Image (cartoon, rainbow, N blue to C red):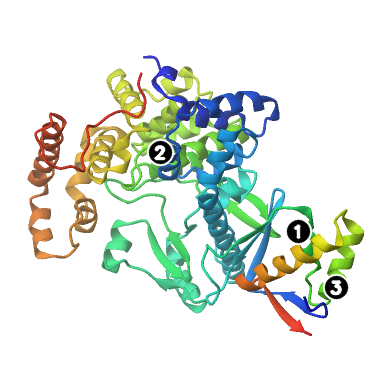
Amino acid sequence: MEKIKIYKKNPNFVARKIADEIILVPIKREAADFEAIYNLNNEVSVRIWELIDGKNSIKEIKDKILEEFEVSSEKLEKDLGQFIKDLEKIGAIQLTSK
Amino acid sequence: MKLRNSFCKEVSYISFLSRVHGNDTIKEELEKLVEEIENNLKRFLNLCQYHEIVPFVYNNLKRIDTPKAKNLLELFKNYYYYEVSRAIYLENEYFALIKKLQEENIDFISLKGIAFYKDIYPDLNFRSMVDIDILVHEGDLKRVEEILKEVGYEKDLEGLSEDYWLKDHCHLRFRRDKVLLEIHWDLAFRIPREIKIPQLWERTKEIEFNGFKIKTLSPEDNIICLALHQRRFNKPLCLKNVLDLVALLNKYKDIDWDYLIEISYKNGMLSSVYFLLLQAKLVLEAPISEALLSQFKISWFKRNLMAKIILENTFSEKLFDDEKRKSLYFKLNFLLYDNLFEFLKYLSWIPQEKFAKFCKFEPYAQKTKIIYKLRWFYLPIKILNNWCISKIRKEGYGKDKNLQKESQLCSA
């Protein structure tokens, strides 16, 4: 995974906190329909979503998660990579710079 | 009449949920009820979909940690998230819309779903929402239309004349992307009579909603709105309306029943309100006293007929059959007006467009025009014909493989 990537949230998605999860829904014409939603239902994914702000690089996000949660570096590397891919796939995040 | 034993476990479960939502001390009871749900889980899902209560049931299933509950959750999951994502989408659109309306000084009241989930439910993931409903003064309609056009909404007349919508309906529909917006100027159709609630606008309450102050109907007028909604065609006995009533009654303990009964009496809708309360009492075991119900002065015969229809049909397979559902709607309408004359007046004055929709005809075809003129003969003959056919098929003489013997969902 290229750790110098920086992502920002797609403004055409709304992130709505409901109970203990965050649900991402596309809200604009060019975005997909209601099937392209994603729910963030654990603390780590919610925190990652918060850290995707157009300023934090992937490496910085990983370092912060390792500080805040008890997770192994290897597992986090793998899960974070997959999570970012999933969010990119549904269009919820956009790459800003490398 | 024994009520509780007439229902099977699915119904007990839904009924129980509506009464004890949020109460963690009854978790064991919930687990027990879920285990007793019959193994036809798909049918349970179909029922919940018809009654538009998937989100409500899903949220309560999450509280239980048994294998059966987990199976149910898996089955419900996609439907639940679809409903929630649609609600989030509508909420987002709603905020943009009310911001614009407030900027343009349009006085409006938010109706039903969008107001309810903020006011009487924990959040939008508890209630199915398919559109945005807003009530405006009739005099503001043209201006609202212009505003909506500016922000990209298009009027959707559904192939019918605008005249029909303005004279014989109570709202106009607008669409933008996936949003369906209904702009109401009244709470119900103006046939057989215009529903007059003189203090509707004065009695509104204001609620805080994401930094906006929005008007909603008073609890009493909300009950009237829910009762009137039953007269619409497409979803007879829909439990979503009944759940709304129960949630309203849970939150607002001091309903002004005198006002409600007086307005209902003056508008010939005592039966509609009574029917809604009766559904809540029979199906969801809401704490609605006999003393209150007796104030509606519904005849013994009508009361028992209403109860019979509710008990036999709320969870019946008839709900999934177009013709049987229409027949049920027709029967219900005899009961939802305070006197037969009102209902006959409605049939006399029913617009051709509504008649065509009910009979699934092309609204302006020549055939439709002719049959519409002969509707007093057509409708009874059609109902009799359907009844005969269903009788014949019940006896097994029909060759139609799709129709099965009619059966009640639950045994007594």
Dot 2 and dot 1 residues touching (CB under 8 Å): no
Name the secondary structure under disc 3: helix
**Which residue is identified by label 2?**
B43
Question: Where does residue B408 sit, x and y in percent of width and height?
Answer: 31, 28
Q: Nearer the viewer, mark 3 or mark 1?
A: 3
Q: Amino acid at mark 3?
A: Lys
In the rendered structure, find residue B306 and report the number of the disc placed on it. none
Name the secondary structure under disc 1: helix
Where B193 falls versus B317 (above or below)?
Answer: below
Question: Where does residue B137 sit, x and y in percent of width and height?
Answer: 46, 60
Question: Where does residue B68 sit, x and y in percent of width and height?
Answer: 55, 34
| Quadrant including the C terminus of chain A | bottom right
Q: Residues within 10 Å of mark 2 (few under 14, many from 20)?
A: some
Q: Residues under labels 2 and 1: Cα distance?
A: 35 Å
- In the depicted view, which residue is nearer to us: B83 or B100? B83
- Could one spot residue B410 in this view of the protein? yes
Q: Residues under labels 3 and 1: Cα distance?
A: 17 Å
**Which residue is identified by label 1?**
A46
